[in-house]
Image (spheres, rainbow, N blue to C red):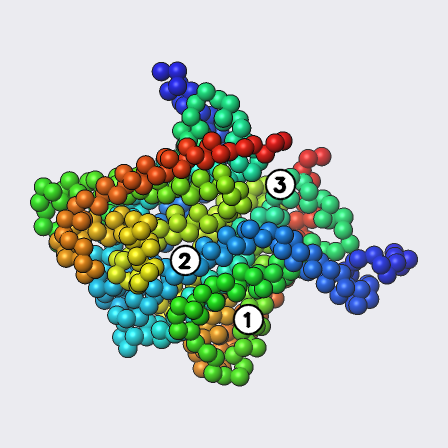
Amino acid sequence: MDRIGASVLTISPGRPFRASLTTFGALVWSGFRRYATYRQATIAGSFTNIVFGFLRCYVLLAVAAGAVGNRPAGYDVEQLATYVWVGQGLLAVTGMWGWAELADRIRTGDIASDLLRPVPPVVSYLAADLGRALHGVLTRFLGPVLVGLLFFPLVTPQRWQTVPLFVLSVLLAVVGCFGCRFLINATAYWLQDARGPQMLWTLGSGVLAGLYFPLRLLPEWLTVTLWVATPLPGLLQTPLDVLVERDPPALQAGLVALQAIWAVLLIWLATVVQRRAERKLVVQGG
Amino acid sequence: MGEIRAYAALAGGKWRSMLSYRASFAAEMLSNVGATVLDVTTVFVLFRATAQIGGFTLAQAILMTGLTAFGFVLADMTVGNIDDLKRYVRTGQLDTMLTRPLPVLPQLVFTDLPLRKLLRLVFGATIYGIALAANDIDWTPARVVLAAVVPVGAAFFFGAIFVLTASFAFWWVESGEIGNGFTYGGRDFTSYPITVYSNWFRDLFAYTLGFGFVSYQPALALLGRTDPLGLPAWAGYVSPLVALPAVAIATAVWRVGIRHYRSTGS
């Protein structure tokens, strides 16, 4: 094993860290390039995000107009508009919906070739997903945010730590969302077809992540339970609350810490599930 | 007669394939009804923060939401799976349908018999019924007819939008999610009183594209309210007719599209 040349792309504790990092970077770049080829889909997706941005923004602003002090759930008008438009941009960055690649590969048996590679599947898929997210930041994120800026008053962050915290929070949201999707897809190891879990995920993730309305509009006990007991608010609501400075600085940082705990937990779970699955896997297709 | 038997065979095939994946069917049915339940729940959650949205109370808003839900699901059940047209065009599978001696549109509709959406339809109808009861409606014969006709009109309108947006695929195969902006976006638009939207955005969706006549105007007529946006009272009673031009345009675009279609060449 030790005679493997430095040029072999691998990620393992036994190899130099430098080489692992290079490999990881190459995988990220490949994920980026893959999505960069879907140019028309990028335009079509942005258009739809923008239409829904208008719809959601107007409804929430109408709610604000009738709410006590014009602050429903503690957000003012500018915070609400920012919440909606940045949220529409982030939707494609975290890539909440539509990823069934792993489940398809398990069903068809293509997963066998992933297992032959010298990189653990969780790591290689995570790297490719980070590349996809980076592409999302540079393309899909910008459209809705620019349109939002053009048509609505958005907030400018007041605290110095808000922007770095937001960047960190988005990164954690991407990792956390990937962890959730990996776990949903991995049910195919046991079920053959992950369509059922996929559908429940599509149904539940949007509303429980705070896409349809800010979760703070719910009764407080429910909001707190969702935040602590599920990773879902960390996929969208946390970065948005951090950006619009909904909470005092301590809580703002605390929410990101909670998000980090969930992200680590989800990746760990994904690794465990993958290892379990490899032990029982019967590759389809002979 | 032969044609009916052919459609029955197509639908029967779908029925049998569905019966062999019962767990999938149950999951799909649940997530389907769940989506509409969430739409309605969202309205309730928003009204926790305020007594009125766009000048309308919860009961009045739910009348529009229920109407939309009912009409949209009716359309989605019948022609909703035309969304798959993109896939048929991209893969060239549409050729198979063109070689059969049946029109393509009904074939697309009948190859999928979305019984999984049935529960959703029941839910939409129930919400509409509850909303009719919850509002203090002064029932006249005209209003009874209107209440019965409006969901059908909404269904035809949304059906036309489904066909129109799916037809994009004839010219732009990778149109992807653009259609969703008008189908699901249109549904979201008509779920709320259109007074919440402003300026050009409202003009575009409500009056140019016609979504304002799907639930908002008819609901005003049922409630006996004058339109704060200035349309006369009779507008509500004639608004289901907006489905007619919509269906005519959709049919025309579909015909042109089918003629424009050139196979993938594979």
Which residue position is annotated with label 2? A52
Which residue position is annotated with label 1? A169
Residue shown at 53% from the left, 84% from the top: A160
Q: Which of marks 1 and 2 is in front?
A: 2
Tag 1 and tag 2, C-beta contact below 8 Å: no
Q: Which of marks 2 and 3 is in front?
A: 2
Residue B80 percent coordinates (x, y):
40, 39
Co-location on one chain, circles 2 and 3 = yes
Residue A212 disc label: none
Q: Can residue B40 be seen in this view?
A: no
Q: What secondary structure is marked by label 2?
A: helix
Residue shown at 40% from the left, 29% from the top: B106
Residue B225 percent coordinates (x, y):
14, 56
Amino acid type indicated by mark 3 = Arg
Which residue position is annotated with label 3? A107
Amino acid type indicated by mark 2 = Phe
Residue A200 percent coordinates (x, y):
47, 50
Disc nearer the start of the sequence (2/3): 2
Q: Is residue A104 visible?
A: yes
Disc nearer the start of the sequence (3/1): 3
Residue shown at 53% from the left, 38% from the top: B87
**In whole angstroms, how far apart are the C-alphas of marks 3 and 1?**
33 Å
Instruction: Tell whether B14 sits left or right of A265.
Output: left
**In whole angstroms, how far apart are the C-alphas of marks 2 and 3?**
34 Å
- Farthest residue toward the right? A3
